[in-house]
């Protein structure tokens, strides 16, 4: 495929169009969702009130749905679709049609749910917990997004399967393998949310049934909700493992280790949903304990990732003559946005992951659950580590797809953007963590709770969050400027889609990694083991169902 050392392997232009379509929706969601985020922090500072009767919970729902569900799903599907095309070859026209069908279904669903939120018919937050009851079109829209994402994901699987068929006995390209793992993880995980939406929430919101079993619904939601966060994380890991080494001029520490960590994510991401329900009555503590153990299992592939990244940096540093324990740090390409933006994400993931381990520890979760600490946690994980990596990916992928160049000026703006983000988030997420430890609740508008002493203590932290939110909003404007430049205005040229090579070129990943029957078999067994008995319990001992509530 490569004619000379300088030639760049391009993503097929027809595939590029579909990826870009995803990115337009993703960055559109970022623009609106970001504005909602700013407004929330301003309201919570106590110094600002929303005009025109707009509700706090309405914008909170818009923010969570747009950022957590729409931006992520569209970005990830667009990125993975391009990554598979780049590494396993152009998609067939059948796969491309499948991809477009999925894209339009997701877009239609987003418009349906988004409209209901804007009409104030669905202020149920991004977790849409029953018994809060939204308009049925909101749930139908979510169904379209989920089913559309399956169809979209099948396009990637088709191209992967074609590659496998044409290359019997050869491990598939690393990035394609990773994309397919994430898509499979997503499909298995979304079965849970599809079940609660289709069988519980839709019939209930349509008035076909009067009541809903809240615990069943929440359990099905969290069966999906935890793997959801790894669905966000794994594309960032794809960049850290397979793209960043190439950008710095180094090598992937071990191709097999990278694959193994992805398999572990596939196995252990799903049977752990109870760690979001540790304080919830109605679930046997023994089963909560079991899922907490599995949660600690799913930390292992992240520790493997940290090890592997340090090893890549270290070995690259040594090859450049760096000495001492931290000598490698100096020789990294600090002026390259494609490196530093995801690197800030990695650095943030160290405290972010530590926070996750705190949450997962049953006793400590009693302290932080439902406090704004948790909001701080996911703004470090999802809204810093993951999203900065997505921004870093965009800075080479968008020009690659549009046939343009990342100019020096945009590269610099990208670096400034990342630092602005980091500073804004340090204020916002930092003060959320502290306020959470002081008992400040999450998911709640401004209140002094009758001027209680404890609530007054929280206010300075809420003001710090508004400062952070404002800085972050500047970061959003900057990233949108870069996106529009790279999509429409940057000079024409060839920007590389960097794909790293393993350090040991002789290394060949064991074929057992691609034995889907084996992994899906173990995954099914784990899920059945972790959920069957508690689920039977939940249903057999169910309280009377709840009618719907509209609290807004
Ligand atoms: Fe979490 C709640 C546990 C990771 C997102 N999490 C949430 C919620 C979200 C979320 C959105 O057990 C709230 C949901 C809601 O609305 O209620 N989380 C964990 C654990 C991990 C974890 C154990 N979470 C994530 C990631 C997310 C995410 C990733 C998004 C992308 N989380 C919980 C729990 C709750 C929870 C409980 C429920 C709390 C409650 O009470 O409600 C682990 O996966 C974390 C493992 C990570 C590491 C870090 C490895 C570090 C690496 C970086 C290396 C850096 C380098 C750079 C090389 C062990 C890989 C070096 C540079 C230098 C400068 C030194
Ligand atoms: Cu979780």
Image: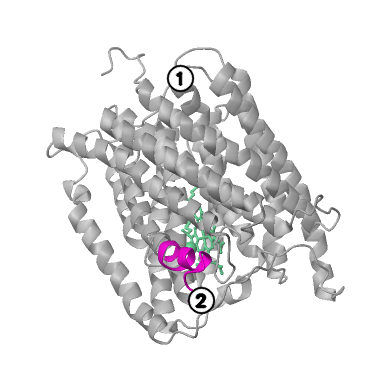
User: Which of the two marks, 2 or 1, is nearer to us in this view?
Assistant: 2
- Inter-mark Cα distance, 2 to 1: 55 Å
| Mark 2 surroundings: few (<14), some (14-19) or many (≥20) residues within 10 A | some
Is 209 a magenta residue?
yes
State the image coordinates of residue 6 (x, y, percent, origin top left): 36, 13
Question: In the picture shown, does residue 15 fall above or below 31?
Answer: above
Residue found at the very far left of the displayed protein: 168
Instruction: Give SS at disc 1.
Output: loop
Residue at left offset 49%, top offset 85%: 543
Residue beneath disc 1: 495
State the image coordinates of residue 382 (x, y, percent, origin top left): 54, 50
Of the numbered discs 2 and 1, the one sitting upstream in the chain is 2
Front one among 100 and 308: 100
Residue at left offset 29%, top offset 51%: 260
Q: Which residues are magenta?
A: 196-214
Apparent side of residue 489 relative to residue 98 in the rendered image (left or right) = right
Instruction: Give SS at disc 2.
Output: loop
State the image coordinates of residue 447 (x, y, percent, origin top left): 80, 67
Is 235 a magenta residue?
no
Q: In this rendering, does residue 226 appear at all?
A: yes
| Mark 1 surroundings: few (<14), some (14-19) or many (≥20) residues within 10 A | many
Residue beneath disc 2: 211
| Cβ atoms under marks 2 and 1 closer than 8 Å | no
Question: In the picture shown, does residue 520 fall above or below 256?
Answer: below
């Amino acid at each position: 495929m490569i004619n000379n050392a300088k030639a760049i392997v391009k993503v097929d232009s027809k595939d590029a169009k579909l990826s870009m379509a995803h990115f337009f929706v993703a960055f559109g969601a970022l623009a609106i969702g970001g504005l909602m985020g700013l407004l929330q922090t301003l309201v919570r500072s106590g110094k600002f009130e929303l005009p025109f009767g707009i509700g706090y919970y309405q914008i909170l729902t818009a923010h969570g749905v747009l950022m957590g569900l729409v931006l992520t799903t569209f970005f990830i599907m667009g990125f993975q679709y391009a990554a598979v095309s780049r590494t396993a070859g152009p998609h067939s026209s059948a796969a491309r049609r499948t991809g477009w069908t999925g894209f339009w279904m997701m877009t239609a669903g987003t418009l349906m749910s988004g409209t209901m939120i804007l009409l104030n018919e669905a202020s149920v937050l991004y977790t849409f917990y029953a018994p809060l009851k939204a308009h049925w079109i909101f749930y139908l829209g979510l169904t379209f997004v989920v089913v559309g994402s399956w169809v979209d994901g099948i396009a990637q699987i088709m191209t992967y399967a074609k590659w496998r068929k044409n290359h019997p006995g050869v491990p598939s390209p690393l990035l394609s393998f990773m994309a397919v793992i994430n898509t499979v993880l997503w499909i298995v995980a979304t079965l849970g949310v599809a079940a609660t939406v289709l069988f519980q929430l839709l019939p209930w919101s349509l008035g076909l049934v009067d009541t809903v079993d809240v615990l069943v619904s929440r359990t099905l939601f969290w069966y999906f909700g935890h793997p959801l966060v790894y669905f966000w994380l794994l594309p960032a890991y794809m960049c850290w493992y397979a793209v960043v080494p190439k950008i710095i001029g180094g090598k992937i520490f071990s191709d097999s280790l990278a694959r193994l960590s992805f398999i572990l994510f596939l196995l252990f991401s799903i049977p752990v949903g109870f760690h979001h329900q540790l304080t919830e009555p109605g679930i046997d503590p023994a089963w909560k304990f079991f899922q907490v153990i599995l949660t600690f299992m799913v930390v292992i592939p992240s520790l493997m990732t940290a090890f592997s990244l340090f090893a890549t940096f270290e070995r690259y540093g040594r090859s450049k003559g760096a000495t001492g324990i931290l000598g490698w740090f100096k020789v990294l390409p600090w002026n390259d946005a494609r490196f530093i933006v995801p690197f800030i994400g990695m650095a943030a993931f160290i405290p972010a992951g530590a926070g996750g381990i705190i949450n997962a520890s049953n006793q400590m979760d009693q302290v932080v659950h439902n406090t704004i600490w948790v909001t701080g946690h996911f703004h470090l994980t999802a809204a810093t580590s993951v999203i900065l990596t997505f921004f870093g990916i965009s800075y080479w992928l968008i020009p690659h797809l549009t046939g343009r160049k990342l100019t020096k000026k945009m590269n610099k703006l990208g670096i400034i953007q990342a630092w602005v983000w980091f500073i804004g988030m340090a204020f916002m997420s930092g003060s959320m963590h502290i306020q959470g430890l002081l008992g400040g609740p999450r998911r709640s508008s401004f209140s002094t709770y009758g001027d209680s002493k404890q609530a007054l203590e929280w206010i300075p932290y809420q003001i710090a969050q508004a400062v952070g939110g404002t800085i972050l909003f500047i970061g959003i404007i900057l990233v949108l400027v870069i996106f529009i430049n790279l999509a429409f205005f940057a000079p024409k040229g060839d920007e590389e889609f960097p794909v790293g090579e393993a350090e040991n070129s002789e290394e060949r990943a064991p074929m057992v990694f691609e034995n889907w029957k084996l992994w899906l078999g173990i995954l099914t067994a784990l899920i059945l083991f972790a959920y069957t008995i508690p689920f039977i319990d939940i249903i057999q001992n169910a309280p009377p169902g709840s009618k719907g509530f509209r609290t807004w």
